[in-house]
Image: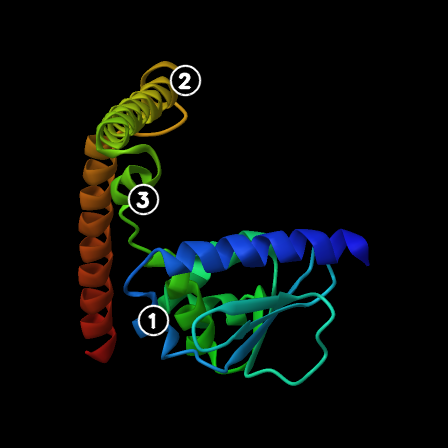
Amino acid sequence: MLWTVLPTGAAEALANHLLSLDEQSPERFKKVAHKRVRVTLTELGKPFTVQALDDSLRFSWVDNEPVDCHIMTRIAVLPELRDTANITRLIKADALDIDGDPLLAQQFSRLFVELDIDWQEQLAQRLGDVPAHFLSQAFARSRSWLEQALDDQKNWVRDVLIEEKQLLVSATEFDVFKQQLQQLRATVDRLEREIGKRKSK
């Protein structure tokens, strides 16, 4: 029991603290106030319940009371739930089962997805303006470098797969193949029409 209660308490405190740093959080809370969502993940087996109060969230592994929405899925599927267009496809593929209002789960996720925290201001309150500005600039440079490094790595892998290993085709080759396929389809359609005309005679 303790292995769930202690981490949950820490996660709940952290989540509510982050939400309190965004001035827009109260507006988003209006859409989920006094609503309850339960998530059962295949890998964990044990249901996890999130309850929205007026301006904070409550987490629980031991809540058995009725909820407004119960989501049953796998951990890998959770990121796809941010896009409403994926829900029907996931349900048909037996990767997702929802009992209740599916839009409610997305409204809960928006509490964090749409978080907009002024970290420089938060740092300035604790460290002062100059250190906060220095740290913010350093973080921005680090993030830019990391994004560039990841982009370079992705391009390198793509070039290796296309040019050296020839496991993938290039965008140009794919476009040529697509055009050839369309021409073949048009030729087949034309032949089918001609055959149909001959049979009708």
* Residue name at image x 29 percent, y 54 percent: 116
The residue carrying pointer 2 sits among few (fewer than 14), some (14 to 19) or many (20 or more) residues within 10 Å by Cα, namely few
* Residue name at image x 60 percent, y 82 percent: 67
**Who comes first in sequence, dot 3 or dot 2?**
3
Report which residue position mark 2 lands on: 165
Report which residue position mark 1 lands on: 26
Give the residue type at disc 2: Lys
The residue carrying pointer 3 sits among few (fewer than 14), some (14 to 19) or many (20 or more) residues within 10 Å by Cα, namely some
> How far is disc 3 from disc 2 in space, using C-alphas?
49 Å
> What x and y, as percent, mark residue 126?
35, 38
159 lies above or below 24? above
Most extreme residue toward the top is: 164
The quarter in which the C terminus is drawn is: bottom left
> How far is disc 1 from disc 3 in space, using C-alphas?
18 Å
> What x and y, as percent, mark residue 118?
26, 47
Q: Nearer the viewer, residue 120 or 168?
A: 120
